[in-house]
Image (cartoon, rainbow, N blue to C red):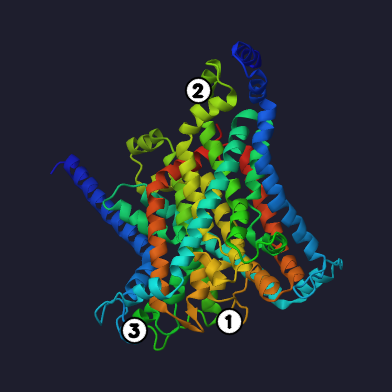
Amino acid sequence: MSQETVAVAEQAPGGEVRRRLADNERLLAVAAMTPAVVYILALVGFPFGLAVLLSFSDVTVGDPSLDLVGLATLRQVLADPVFWQSLRNTFVFTLVSNALVVVLATALALILTKDFRCKWLVRFLVLLPWTTPVSLATITWLWTLDSIFSPIDWVLRQVGLIESNVIWLGKPGFALASVITVHTWRIVPLAAVIIMAGLIAIPSEIRDASDIDGARFWRRTFEIEVPLMAPIIGVAVLFGVILTVTDMTVVYVLTRGGPTNSTQVLASWAYFKGIEGGDLAQGAGTALFLLPVLVAVAALILRFARRRDVM
Amino acid sequence: MTALETDRRRADRRRVWGRVALYALAIGAALAAAFPFLWSTITMFKQDQDLYIKENNPFWFNEPPTMEHVTYLFTNTEFLTFVSNTVVVGLAVVVITLAISLPAAYSLARLVGRWGERMGIAIFLVYLIPPTLLFIPMSRVVSALGLHESLWSLVLVYPTITIPIAVWLLMGFFKGIPRDIEEQAMVDGYSRAEAVLRTVIPLVFPGMVAVTVFSFTLAAHEFIYALSFISATAEKPISIGVPTALVRGDVFFWQSLQAAAVLVAVPIALVFNLFLDRFISGFTMGAVKG
């Protein structure tokens, strides 16, 4: 092909040098990639290196000079019981939410790929939790779970299940459950959309063949569709895990980590330490503990990529 | 009655029950997803003396509905400033994202071969390094550049979130376009750069639309960078402006606050609905290797 293009270039009148440059594939490839690579190195690579460096320093807002102190900062981070609470919460929130997401999102995807009336309206309402900026979506929950005026409490009072309000966000157990609910609620639509993409890709012959064989809804769903969807469900869960592990918005808006740090997660704890508390070194050190989870997710994605069928 | 008739009747009955179950599930899912928003929508039109009485039915207008609090949101708060800040940041981020991702995605899809596949995965993995890991060093970078307390800090930083996804999505779209098209244009005497501009870019337009919608939304969603870099009310985008500035002391203006959430949520969800099918096809194209 390169011979061909050279031939074309020779025939072309004028501007041959420029033309040859524009046809030089290797040069073109490098030129096209450079902005993206430079941008990522400057604004992801460099800050990432700085994050590691900060974790081994004692930088605070009051004393911004970067003095390396070895492992002292990280030791301080680990000595704080709130750190361990945050670590445990991060895992609990992520595991419980995403277990729920798998079931609910698969069900939702199966519903949304069927035909029914007013489907656009259902689709619109179902997508709201995911398309709304997280902080605003969480604000609607903050009001739904209000200690005095929660409509959920009103219903429970009317039915006679409770005498006085539950105070969802004021007690550790209920606050944990609330955060898990909000995470699940906002991730299910995204996971369902990803799973829908996989469902639509299932060849219709398979479905027709199972219809002819007389397979009924349950058998068709659980013996044919769900196994075929398994890889894409995996992808959806990976996205869900990333979104929950790294999120601090839900906790920040809903509970500020309270009551008494019982809903704190790594990301929110890093924020409270690093930005509000001004201890940049400890904040960066806390956030760094997200890394093992992300590396594990990356390894899984690479395995998917190697299998070549999805991702 | 013949056996055949019984069979058919049984099948009909099963079909009817299937439809009933489908509608019940669809309505249930819609209600579960939209419940907080429905409650917010009712709230935003309620009068104070209706809302703040514990025994009043929260799902009913015990007093006539009022626009008072919605008007208040627009006239007495910084809501419109937050919205316009978000729009400015979002549009700037979309432009930067497209300008950087289009050439990179094309290059990865067409020019660099096997090596490009690995590079593509590497760029996708950048997506896994989240703002929550970088916000502290990033706030130092932003200060060093003199962008602290400025919207432009967000314009600078948000493309780190959007570019990896945009490259990935666009790569899928480029792979979906047959090579013959630009090769034909090159045979016709255009250089590769010209051929791409004239033939491939118009075809990849749906992908650019998907990236635009997606990047704008990600920029509007982002919370922790904005929270860490900006504390001046006039520079806040909607994601941090509403939760931090519409609270007076410890008193929430509940009606106005919920009005803000609903008025932002609805348009974004409508736009997403328009592009959902395109987004799904974009995702599968990026996902299925060409």
Q: Are marks 3 and 2 on the same chain?
A: yes
Quickly name the residue at label 3: B48
Q: Amino acid at mark 2?
A: Ile
- Up the image or down, B105 lies above or below B179; here it is below
CA distance separating discs 1 and 3: 28 Å
Residue B196, x across and y down, in percent: 54, 28
Quickly name the residue at label 2: B181
Q: Residue at x 66, y 20 (%)?
A: A20
Q: Are marks 3 and 2 in contact (CB under 8 Å)?
A: no
Query: Is residue A101 something that shows in the picture?
Result: no
- Up the image or down, A306 lies above or below A166; here it is above
Quickly name the residue at label 1: A259
Q: Would you say A84 lies left or right of B237 here?
A: right
| Mark 1 neighbour density, 10 Å: few (under 14) some (14–19) many (20 or more) | some
CA distance separating discs 1 and 2: 62 Å
Query: Is residue B178 something that shows in the picture?
Result: yes
Q: Amino acid at mark 1?
A: Pro
Residue A86: image quadrant is: bottom right
